[in-house]
Amino acid sequence: MSGEPIAMKIAELLEGGSFGVVPGTYERLVKGRRHGLHVEVRCTWSSDIHTWSVEIKGAGPLVLATAHRRSIGEGSAIASGAITDVGSGDATFDREWLVEGAPAATTRLVFGEEAVRQKLGAIPKSYFEVDGGDVRVGGKGHYEVADVKNGIEAAVALRLRLT
């Protein structure tokens, strides 16, 4: 499925959803609401680039955090102190995911809810960022509408966790 049909289907998932093409790009911008929150979804689909991201902005606590699936080579960066793995408090999740953030206690609180971790785990090749009250969830590589739908639900869950 190409960018246009995906963007149309994503717009249908949102209350008041609409989409358009970002001029001069392969990017589609979808806007709407979910659970009362303003959601923006960006989808890029070309012959060699496949990415998507969901962004929800709002006021929130002072926290800067990221989470992504662990990759080869991070162990030495963690051991050297270049990366600080604060974890979520769930050993099973923490074996698969690297959670970084400051302050550490607030980061653990954000990623500490089981429902949030389940939503994050349902999305392949994804990343998560929290900057104050702003939340961004995204993925790279081939994706389907279901991946973006899970991303929207994960972003909403994270954003609601910040209120």
Image (tube, rainbow, N blue to C red):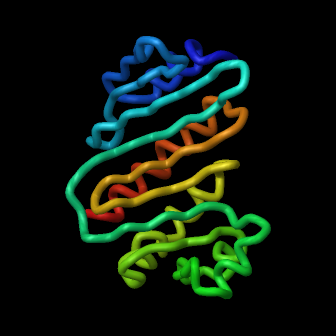
Residue in view at x 51 percent, y 73 percent: 100
Task: Decide if residue 156 is in sight here.
Answer: yes
Q: Which residue is drawn at 25% across and 69% down?
A: 61
Across and down, in percent, residue 129 comes to: 45, 57
Q: In which quarter of the image is the C terminus?
A: bottom left
| Numbered label tally | 0
Q: Which of 35 and 134 is in front in this view?
A: 134
- Among the 4 quarters of the image, the one containing residue 31: top left
Q: Where is residue 35 in the image (x, y as percent from the top left)?
A: 32, 43
Q: Which residue is drawn at 68% across and 49% down?
A: 125
As rendered, which of 135 and 149 lies closer to the eye? 135
Q: In this view, does 1 lie above or below 73?
A: above
Which residue is at the front of the view, 41 or 44?
44
Which quarter of the picture shows residue 157? bottom left
Q: In this view, does 18 lie to the left or right of 125?
A: left
Question: Residue 3, relative to residue 72: is it above or below?
Answer: above
Image quarter for residue 81? Answer: bottom right
110 versus 57 height, above or below: below
Residue 51 image offset from top left, x and y in percent: 60, 34
- Residue drawn at x 44%, y 74% as measured from the top left: 101
Q: Quadrant of the N terminus?
A: top right
Q: Can residue 85 be seen in this snapshot?
A: no
Image position, residue 118 (x, y; %): 59, 61
